[in-house]
Amino acid sequence: MAWLAQPSASMFSFFFLPIPFLYALRINSPKKYGLMGVFLLRLFTTVCSILRMTQIPVIATGSGNSTLLVLWGNIEMNVGVCMYPNLLMRLY
């Protein structure tokens, strides 16, 4: 699981770095909070990715049941592909 620590730490830093800058933007509040929501959805997809990656050793060494791997992969893909364009279209 050590291979998971460095990429996850860098991903989490990319989510929280722009939040203070987004908060300081001079745009109306709904658009500002919508942009922050997009970054928080990126955080959610990263959590799904981490949960998906933790299932790989379980499948390789254990039961071979890949249900949770497929579940977290589908959740990550659906949130990443379907929600981002909808949120961005509402911001503009």
Image (tube, helix red, strand yellow):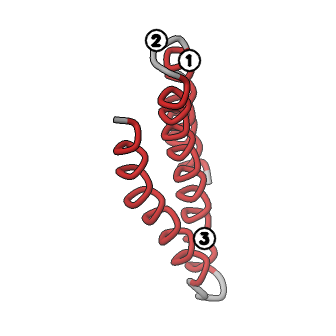
| Mark 2 Cα shell of 10 Å, populated few (<14), some (14-19), many (≥20) | few
For the point 55% across and 78% down, the residue is: 60
Label whose residue precedes the other's in the sequence (2 or 3): 2
| Residue wearing tag 3 | 55
Q: Position of residue 32 (x, y in %)?
A: 51, 26
In this picture, residue 26 sits left or right of residue 37: left
The C terminus: image quadrant? top left
For the point 43% across and 64% down, the residue is: 77
| Residue wearing tag 2 | 26
Q: Please, what is the three-letter code of the amino acid marked with disc 1?
A: Tyr
Query: Marks 2 and 3, how far apart in space?
Result: 43 Å
| As drawn, 56 above or below 88 | below
For the point 55% across and 75% down, the residue is: 69
In this picture, residue 92 sits left or right of residue 24: left
Q: Please, what is the three-letter code of the amino acid marked with disc 2?
A: Arg
Q: Position of residue 87 (x, y in %)?
A: 43, 46
| As drawn, 56 above or below 27 | below
